[in-house]
Amino acid sequence: MLATLERIDPNSDNIDLLVELVCHLRPRQRWVWQTVDDPAQSVRTLTQLLKGNPDQAWALRRYITTLLEKRRHTSLYSDIGILSNDGFVTELKSRITYRILPPALEDLYLSDALDQVLYRQDDYEWIRAVPDTDWMALFHVIESAPVPADANPGRARVVTLKGLLDAIRTLSCRVCALGLEPRLVHSYSQIENFDSPFLMQNIEVNRYLDEYARYLNGDIPRPDDARHLLVMLDQCEDVVLKIRRLALSSGTSIALTYLLVALQQSIDRLQKLLFLVDVPEVDATADTPDPTAATQDVLSAMATGTPQLADAAAAPVTLTPQGNIAVVTDQPAPELTLRERAVIELAEELIEAHNTKYQVTNLVRDNVDLLARNVTENASRTGEHYIAEDRKGLRKMLWSSSGAGFIVGFMALLKILLGYLHSPPLVQAFLFSMNYSFGFVLIHMLHFTVATKQPAMTAQRIAASLHRSETGRGLDVDRLAELVNKVFRTQMVAVLGNVLVAFPVAWAIAESVRWYRGEHLVDPIKALHLLNEIDPVNSLALFYAAVAGVWLFVAGLVSGYYDNKALYTRMGQRVQQLRGLRTLLGPERLARLGGYVENNLGGLMGNFFFGILLGTTGTVGFLLGLPIDIRHITFSAANFATALVALDYQMTVPQIINATAGVLLIGTINLLVSFGLALWVALRARKIRFKRGILLVQALGRRFAYSPVEFFLGPKHRQLAPPDTDPVRGPK
């Protein structure tokens, strides 16, 4: 470290020595069993070396100033950590490309200098690990170094301040442009009824910067503060929040979500920069314009990747037994001012954003979370229709699921007949997919219910209930237990309706074929194959059931996505604008059709894609040589009935038990996997962590003990009252 300091040329703009100096501060890479270096110790050592040699401190200061003067600052503050205007897909492709082959660096920009100095992707971690006071103490030593008679100590301050002011103007123009985007105005049309805060803030920024320029020229003692401008930015944030709330009911898109994230990032950065350059009232009495002098020196050092300075007493040094320099830190750390803390936070934010600027996960997380929230919100509203409140509702669910079981019985028959065509694999996959897709769509159009479709929807409903409890003092466990109990018994009734009807329908079809044709629908070999497909012990039936559970979960997401899309694009209104259909159907019928499409597009597309997933999985597994297929409880029950007839009921008791257990276990895996995945995604989309599952289990136990019959059959006319007078509350 000392040798590097001695080789510094104050007038050089070669960044290699700064890279070398930062390497001395950076912890060395160690094996797991080795002691990790303390970066704070290295920073304190450098502080003491510079304090003991003021000439080297001045040389380092002059060297950093030269680097700052030779590079442009604006892009560092206005671009790093903020999404570009290219859009989600373009930004995603750029990050993937640059992660493989980074772009060429230039010495013209300060952001590229940061790339050269802090080239490791984890540099921000050790920089954050160093206490703020240690960074401030280091740069206080650099800032207070004796200035030669022929030197200009304010050069770094002027260069950095100009870069900050240019970044403020750039960010303001960007906020104005993003705020006037047509898709944003389309999502919040009320903004056209008053002066857009996005446009007004740009006018206010230009006025503020013009006055600031007069202040720097010495024409006025002090510019007005940025309070009015910050109020305009707060109004911009309010519009962004309103659009996000409206998106929950009117839908959103990836493009709008990306726009909102970029807009919020730009507003946040603009507020931070305004706080740093704003001139306190105490500076107005200064003899010469010297805005935020100490802060600007801090930013000068920060801009090269080595954070800030402050008034901090330096600690004494000592020698270790190995002859290395060590710093004694028994002195209390000084308190930092609000502005100093703001500078440190901005520096760490810029460094972390720089180190992670090519990470795909951050981009996906920032944009998909909001979109997933809207998708799951639509799915949660759909999930309300899958929950029966009382016994009357359970009877309706039983009738609805029985209708689905009746149709599934014929779908299973058609799948067997399609298999007899012995079509090429891709043709067979298409035929199977259309059988599943059109069958599930017909079930939806007839308002019937497939039991395994429920969990992906009801999980969103439970997550929505948990999210609403965040606004209160705690989670009402009894109300949550009541909701879970409703979901449980509704699900059980739906499963019974599907299985208890699909099985006899498939049996009746098989017997009818034997009576009419004089031969079985399937031969004994095919019947044994059908039984082997649902064998939970000697086949991969349970794994295939898990695959089907994943597809059920995906179908739920597809359904929520298209519900969101129908709302966002005003699908019903678009259908009603079709002149050809208006002439064919008339205005009233077309209006009903438009309303039906908007309200049911998610259900129709979810069922259609679910059928494609079920129909193509087995073929894809066959073509790739992978053990991938699907097992669905309702179709498994229908195949069991078909095999039973084909074997002339010559099945042993163990075979019957094994097949029955296979059907039940397949259904259990279907439900658990789809419900678990859907609940996990819904909780993550709402940023909820439920940690008190034991309280929920206890509440469910109390409800069962209070009334076992109503626990399974539900109340006759109204909801079951909580068994305790006071609800049990607990944190999530």
Image (cartoon, helix red, strand yellow):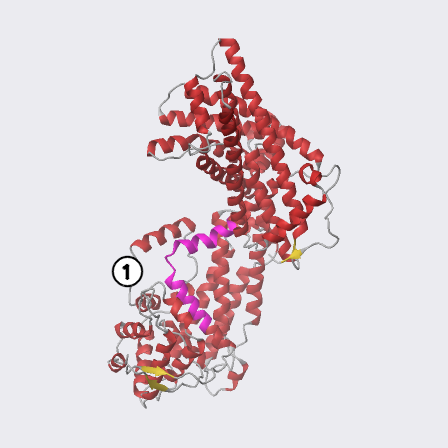
Q: Nearer the viewer, residue 168 or 446?
A: 446
- For the residue pair 190 and 562, the one nearer the viewer reads as 562
Taking depth in this image into account, of 273 and 486 the one nearest to the observer is 486
> Can residue 258 be seen at all in this image of the molecule?
no
Q: Which residues are magenta?
A: 344-371
435 over 378 or under it: above or below: above
Residue visible at 42% across and 24% down in the picture: 529
Q: Describe residue 711's horizontal placement relative to residue 116 as left or right.
A: right
Residue 698 spot, x, y in % from top left: 64, 50
Which quarter of the picture shows residue 493? top right
Which residue has dot 1 on it?
A: 104
Q: Quick check: 494 left or right of 90?
A: right
**Dividing the image into 4 quarters, which one contains the C terminus?**
bottom right
* Rendered location of residue 380, percent (x, y): 59, 44
Q: Residue at x 41, y 81 (%)?
A: 137
**Residue located 51% across and 56% down the image:** 179
Asked if the magenta segment contains residue 6, the reply would be: no
Q: Residue furthest front?
A: 653
Identify the main secondary structure in magenta: helix
| As drawn, 293 above or below 727 | below
Return the x and y of residue 535 as percentages of the image width and height: 46, 30
Q: Identify the amino acid type marked 1.
A: Ala
Q: Secondary structure at mark 1?
A: loop
Q: Position of residue 147 (x, y in %)?
A: 34, 88
- How busy is the neighbourhood of tag 1: few (under 14 within 10 Å), some, or many (20 plus)? few
The quadrant in which residue 72 appears is: bottom left
- Can residue 349 be found in the magenta stretch? yes
